[in-house]
Amino acid sequence: MKYFLIDASSYVAWALEGRPRVDFMAMHESGAAFLYMLQFCVTEVMSSFSRIYYFQAGSDRITKEKFKKLCADFAENIHERKKIYIYDLHRYHNIVAEKKGVFAAACATDPNIGVFDILLISMAMELNEVYKDKNDEIEILSEDRKLCVAARELGLRAHSIGPGGAK
């Protein structure tokens, strides 16, 4: 079984691009993967869809119908945590980030790394403690290169779903 912690950027890429290198939803539907998404990534996904619909220029802009479908499909995918389990942020994730040196290590990798990226890394570390067997290790999926590099520096599995890798 694969366990994926999906960043908003990878979900949006999957929803918009269709056939990624890592199709986490197809893996879930076949019973080969369990999907986590952080609570704050829900807002990031909806914000990304809204930005693309309302503010994207030219051919990159999506139609109203596509926007509504993306939002409805996402709502269905997170509904009752049946397809994507929404993982809640708790105060101990901040403590884990501090005690395990996640903040310092991530900032040493890239001083401009975002606080949500640091929390995502911290939450992945906590999930890895739940899944002690290395075969069941959490894999972070993100299109954010800074996040992937920092996560790998801290000993986590992290990669992009797209063919070109994280940007």
Image (tube, rainbow, N blue to C red):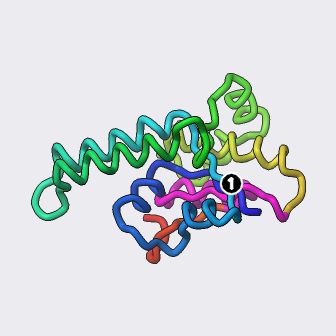
Which residue is at 84% across, 44% downward? 130
Q: Could you say where residue 92 lies in the image, as x and y percent from the top left?
A: 73, 26
In the picture shown, does residue 62 fall above or below 30? above
User: Along the horizontal axis of the image, is 125 left or right of 103?
Assistant: right
In the picture shown, does residue 121 fall above or below 140? above
Q: Could you say where residue 145 lies in the image, as x and y percent from the top left?
A: 50, 61
- Magenta part of the protein: which range? 135-157
Which residue is at 63% across, 52% downward? 35
- The residue tagged 1 is 34
**The stretch drawn in magenta includes residue 62:** no
Residue type at mark 1 is Phe
Q: Could you say where residue 111 lies in the image, as x and y percent from the top left?
A: 52, 46
Q: Residues within 10 Å of mark 1 (few under 14, many from 20)?
A: many
On the image, which quarter does residue 17 sit in?
bottom left
On the image, which quarter does residue 72 sit in?
top left
Q: Secondary structure at mark 1?
A: strand
